[in-house]
């Protein structure tokens, strides 16, 4: 494996990403909304709970899973709302960031090359299929992981500042989110890029590839709905299991993608 060639491919792809507004804008805008704007909304929780009667609050707490309800015991309605929102509701939403960042970069990796008329020159470079694929994968995976880590640091600051106004103490960092960021987020990024790797090779345009590949967000939405309805809640064991499942799916998709990835087929599609 020629790592110098792989690094050269990564630098080239990342340079294109930075210069492409259609790719860089979602990468910047989505984390800003999730990690700064949304945590600030907890400041409105006291006014929301003030307008709700005790029956409404009891029904809301009755819907969540028993394990999550235990985490909210002893808290006032305002405090329970803050903990529920910042720690548990935002957990599945956080996974959208690494998934979508890797997804949008991977969508541009081959389809974008084809649209820019640079894919043919790339395919004729003296690199093996494995090196070419590794360069494309890492160029999407590394930025997604970096954005997740930086985003978590920003979220920690903004969420703690907001929580301090109501609870009087910091909520982050905590063990659940440490596992989420270090174990599950890279696996979510891998899911985004491996699924897009299979889609983008056959898609005709960047928009087609991105729209098709964005369907991988649906499992994240189901996790969010499951937590709201009380079917599950994000504890450490669930988070560890979720990460394991995602890594297994990543390995299967990567194995299949590696076996089906041949530059001769890409050349034939030019």
Image: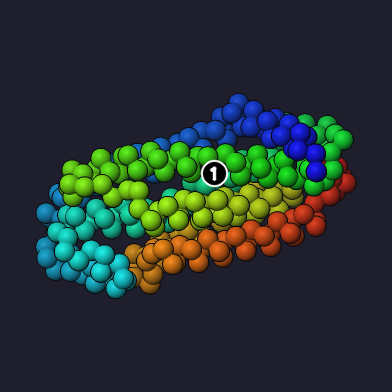
Residue denoted by label 1: 145
Q: Give the quadrant of residue 16.
A: top right
Q: Residue at x 38, y 38 (%)?
A: 154
Left or right, residue 166 beside residue 159: left
Would you identify the image quadrant in which residue 24 lies?
Answer: top right
Q: Residue at x 29, y 54 (%)?
A: 85
Percent coordinates x, y for residue 67 in the rendering: 31, 71
Give the position of the N terminus as an image quadrant.
top right
Position of 143 relative to 250 (above/below): above
Label 1: how many residues lie within 10 Å, few (<14), some (14-19) or many (20+)? many
**SS at mark 1?**
helix
Q: Relative to the observer, which residue lies in front, 182 or 103?
A: 182
Residue 192 rendering spot, x and y as whole percentages: 59, 51
Which image quadrant is residue 59 in?
bottom left
230 left or right, relative to 104: left
User: Is residue 156 found left or right of 8 in the rendered image?
Assistant: left
Q: Is residue 136 above or below residue 251?
A: above
């Amino acid at each position: 494996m020629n790592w110098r060639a792989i690094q050269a491919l990564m630098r080239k792809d990342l340079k294109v990403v930075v210069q492409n507004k259609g790719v860089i804008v979602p990468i910047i805008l989505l984390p800003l909304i999730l990690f700064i704007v949304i945590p600030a909304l907890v400041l409105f929780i006291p006014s929301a709970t003030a307008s709700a009667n005790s029956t409404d609050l009891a029904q809301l707490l009755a819907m969540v899973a028993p394990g999550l309800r235990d985490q909210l015991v002893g808290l006032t309605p305002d405090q329970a709302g803050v903990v529920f929102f910042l720690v548990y509701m935002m957990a599945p939403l956080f996974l959208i960031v690494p998934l979508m960042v890797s997804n949008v970069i991977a969508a541009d990796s081959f389809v974008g090359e084809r649209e820019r008329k640079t894919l043919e020159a790339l395919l004729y470079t003296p690199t093996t299929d494995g090196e070419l694929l590794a360069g494309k994968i890492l160029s999407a995976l590394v930025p997604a992981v970096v954005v997740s880590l930086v985003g978590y640091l920003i979220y920690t600051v903004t969420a703690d500042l907001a929580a301090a106004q109501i609870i009087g103490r910091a909520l982050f960092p905590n063990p659940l989110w440490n596992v989420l960021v270090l174990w599950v987020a890279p696996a979510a990024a891998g899911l985004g890029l491996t699924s897009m790797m299979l889609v983008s090779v056959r898609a005709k345009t960047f928009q087609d590839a991105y729209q098709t590949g964005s369907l991988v967000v649906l499992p994240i939405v189901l996790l969010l709905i499951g937590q709201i309805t009380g079917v599950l809640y994000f504890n450490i064991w669930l988070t560890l299991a979720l990460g394991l499942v995602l890594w297994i799916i990543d390995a299967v998709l990567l194995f299949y993608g590696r076996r089906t990835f041949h530059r001769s087929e890409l050349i034939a599609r030019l």
